[in-house]
Amino acid sequence: MAKSKLVKANEKIAENVVDGYKKVEESVVGGYKKIEEGVRLKNSKLSQNR
């Protein structure tokens, strides 16, 4: 009985860790995409001004 409680607790912790990792990953990737898009827009504006 105690083992099943421990297993359930570990599963809940694992789910929270995975959810947290996904949020961090989405934030990092989303931030990178915004930076990449900004650089691309800046470069296209610079090339139009030449």
Image (cartoon, grey):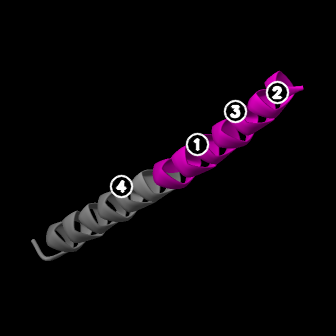
Contact? badges 1 and 2 (CB < 8 Å): no
Q: Would you name the residue on which mark 3 appears?
A: 10
Contact? badges 4 and 1 (CB < 8 Å): no
Looking at the image, which is closer to me, 24 or 34? 24
Residue under the point 24% across and 63% down: 39
Dot placed on the residue nearer the N-terminal end, 3 or 2: 2
Q: Residue 2 carries which label?
A: 2
Looking at the image, which is closer to me, 29 or 50? 29
Amino acid carrying mark 3 in the image = Asn
Looking at the image, residue 38 sits to the left or right of residue 28; the answer is left
Q: In x, y percent, where is residue 26?
A: 52, 54
Could you give the CA–CA distance between mark 4 and mark 1, rounded to whole angstroms? 22 Å
Between label 3 and label 1, give the one nearer the viewer: 3
Residue under the point 38% across and 65% down: 34
Secondary structure predominantly adopted by residues drawn in magenta: helix
* Secondary element at image label 4: helix
Q: In x, y percent, where is residue 37?
A: 36, 63
Q: Which mark is residue 17?
A: 1
Q: Is residue 25 above or below residue 38?
A: above
Amino acid carrying mark 1 in the image = Val
